[in-house]
Amino acid sequence: MPLILGIESTCDETSAAIVADGWGVRSNVVSSQVELHAKYRGVVPEIASRAHLQNILPVLREALRDADCGLDQVDAVAVAHRPGLIGSLLIGVTAAKAIAWALHKPLIGVDHVHAHLYSVVLETNSQPPMPAVGLVCSGGHTALYAMRSMEEVSLIGSTLDDAVGEAYDKVASILGLGYPGGPIIDRLAQQGDPKVLRFPRTYLQRDSLDFSFSGLKTAVLYHVRGVPGKVSSAPKEPPTGQELADLAAGFQAACVDVLIEKLRRAASRIQAKSIIVGGGVSANTGLRNALPRLNLPVFAPPLRYCTDNAAMTAGLAFRYLQAGQFSPLDLDAIPYSRFTEPADSR
Ligand code: KG4
Ligand code: ZN
């Protein structure tokens, strides 16, 4: 029963996990930096890197202690080495390399976005019927994938501008709410009526699998502050009370309708037998409630594995271990996903 130590530091969560056999989560410690970034209403890269540097060893120690596992019992060291903020990635990658080198154990670099898709396997060892459509929706990514298996994944659509989680965070900032905005707007939306305000749904061309959320964000901005250059009856101060809840519900309905329509198109395009969702926004109540509209088996991780965590990194790495695919000790930290690698960098 191979035990893999996973390390995650792609953005603003420092995490370490011990996972057995690719799905048995022995421990998963996540140290969130949310409070450090909240006053800036977004992640500040240098603050994130420095916090990873402070947190990485305590988080590693706690993950080993929780799993009652010594470093010598670990069979491989996995790290999310792409995509992410480069300064953040460097901390996790360097830690993983040092441990692998000192222990003479294999190093396995995995793609963080791919790991979000894999998170549905954790704890359940579920095997979604293939082909499947994968949706990764988070603060940094909104993309659709055709999956022939958990390992064979290709990109079929992605956002042309903001990620959906980014739109949530920016709308929360416009409304003077806290950071991250997703969970706050989600909670408010549950008290609101989505029919009071109808915001635009950007579906792009009829067969497009791409997304665009910046227009929706601007529509909220204009609703709240008024359209520049026009006399507007829009409120000058951000709404409060029921008005705020209705706005949140209207915004959330627009996001969810677009995500569901794109999933429907993608499923029909590849004749999918199931749907897999992952990433921070897959925790969203509106999205979860709407997924049954697709009439396909849906696999979504438990809420603790929706946002960034190292268990998904260690889990996916097990598949590489099985295939004997290891990374060299000069493994690089790479800002973009392997699915969106610019052609001139290959
Ligand atoms: O996957 P994640 O932890 O980090 C990235 O890889 O980006 O996702 C964080 C994002 C944030 O934008 C946050 O606002 C959003 O996920 N999020 C949500 C919810 N929970 C987290 N968005 C909508 N509804 C939620 N319940
Ligand atoms: Zn993520």
Image (spheres, grey):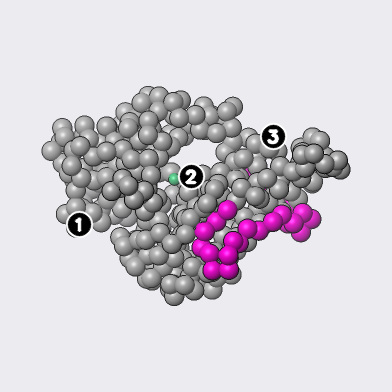
Which residue occupies the foreground of this view, 311 or 146?
Answer: 146
Distance between the Cα atoms at labels 1 and 2?
A: 30 Å
Q: Which residue corresponds to the image point at 76% horizontal and 45% vertical from the top-left?
A: 223
Q: Is residue 95 above or below residue 125?
A: above
Q: In the image, ligand 2 is in what quadrant?
A: top left
Q: Which mark is residue 140?
A: 2
Distance between the Cα atoms at labels 3 and 2?
A: 21 Å
Looking at the rendered structure, the secondary structure element under dot 2 is loop
| Mark found first going from the N terminus, 3 or 1 | 3
Q: Which residue corresponds to the image point at 35% horizontal and 35% vertical from the top-left?
A: 89
Question: Which residue lies under the disc numbered 3?
Answer: 176
Q: Residues within 10 Å of mark 2 (few under 14, many from 20)?
A: some
Nearest to viewer (mark 1 / mark 2): 2
Nearest to viewer (mark 3 / mark 2): 2
Q: Is mark 2 within 8 Å of ligand 1?
A: yes
Residue 206: in magenta span: yes
Looking at the rendered structure, the secondary structure element under dot 1 is helix
Q: Which mark is residue 282?
A: none
Amino acid type of the residue tagged 2 in the rendering: Gly
Q: Residues within 10 Å of mark 1 (few under 14, many from 20)?
A: few
Q: Which residues are magenta?
A: 184-212
Amino acid type of the residue tagged 3 in the rendering: Gly
Q: Position of residue 225 (x, y in %)?
A: 77, 38
| Mark found first going from the N terminus, 3 or 2 | 2
Instruction: Tell how many labels.
Output: 3
Question: Which residue lies under the disc numbered 1?
Answer: 322
Amino acid type of the residue tagged 1 in the rendering: Gln
User: Can residue 247 be seen here?
Assistant: yes
Q: Which residue corresponds to the image point at 56% horizontal and 43% vertical from the top-left?
A: 166
